[in-house]
Image: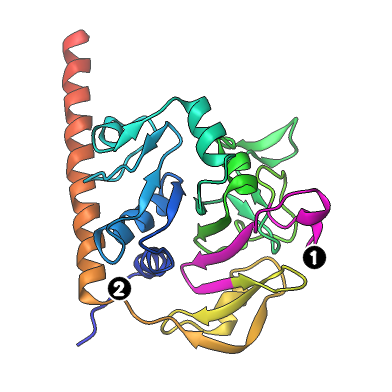
Amino acid sequence: MSQSFTPNEIMTIAAARALSNSDVCFVGIGAPSAACNVARLTHAPDITLIYESGTIGTAPTVLPLSIGDGELCETSVTTVSVPEMFRYWLQGGRVTIGFLGAAQLDKFGNINTTVIGDYDKPKTRLPGGGGAPEIASSCGEIYITLAQSTRSMVEKIDFVTSFGHGEGGDHRARLGITTKGPTLLITDLAIWKPDPVTKEFTVVALHPGVTREKVQETCGWKVKFAETVEVTPAPDALELTTLRDLKARTDAAHKGTEQAGAKRGSKDG
């Protein structure tokens, strides 16, 4: 008997399934981190997870709130300096997958995490790129996870933080970038892959119960669908239990941290 699941759960699990046991993955905080750790706890126990702070082969029991969480260092095989991690591991071609999120995304996989609106007078100032621009250009390929909306999936992003396929086609190659760039987009509604020629993201699978109309309603560009559109297999019991247990442990751990911080604050006051 199939279990019920949320759109966010199937997005995370579908993303986890895309990872293999032999992958070396540069992990972003948030949804990418959840997907990578579900993969590690299910079908890919030997996957190597790297976080931007320099932790190599980390195996956290809870999801980190930031790249500086002690859990990442405590459970890693080793921790290196940030310059070594970027130069030797990332730019040295030793990372197979970069897993990123986005505030804004266009149809060619270009990512904005810098500003909404004009750069000099933005409506919203976002956290910024961090190491994402280097990840986008240096990892073997890029996977992106994103909850669909017309605000997040737009015809033209307000700022190019991380280069995807640029204007499409061979734009990466013309700039001398030899890595594949974005090869997979997993949203809460569908799975997308770039067209082999144009590099425009195309829907190749719909999650159970999702219609083409729903995908178009929540996307800011004219959606293209593959000639054959599959249905994403529903999450199984192991996948759901693993994800939910991971989230429960994370919530409990972070709640404890918040309570401890509040107590220290009251004493200091």
- Point out the stretch of residues depicted in magenta: 164-192
Asked if residue 177 is among those painted magenta in the image, a careful observer would answer yes
Q: Earlier in the sequence, mark 1 or mark 2?
A: 2
Instruction: Give me the residue at 63% from left, 41% from top.
Output: 133
Above or below 87: residue 251: below
Kind of residue sitting beneath label 1: Gly
Regarding residue 208, the answer to whether it shows in the image is yes
Residue 214 position in % (x across, y down): 55, 78
Compared across the picture, whether 94 is left or right of 257 comes to: right
Measure the C-alpha gap from mark 1 to mark 2. 37 Å
Write down the quadrant of residue 164 in the picture: bottom right
Q: Residue 66: in sight, yes or no? A: no
Which residue is found at the position 50% from the left and 87% from the top? 230
Q: Identify the residue position indicated by label 1 in the image.
A: 169
Q: Residue furthest top?
A: 268
Quadrant of the image containing the C terminus: top left
Say few, some or many: other residues with alpha carbon within 10 Å of mark 1 (under 14 / 14 to 19 / 20 or more): some
Q: Horizontally, is 44 left or right of 128 in the view?
A: left
Q: Which label sits on residue 239?
A: none
Residue for point 41% across, 63% down = 19
Q: Which residue is mark 2?
A: 5
Relative to residue 253, is residue 9 depicted above or below?
below
Choose top left, top right, bottom left or bottom right for residue 29. top left
Q: Position of residue 148 (x, y in %)?
A: 54, 64
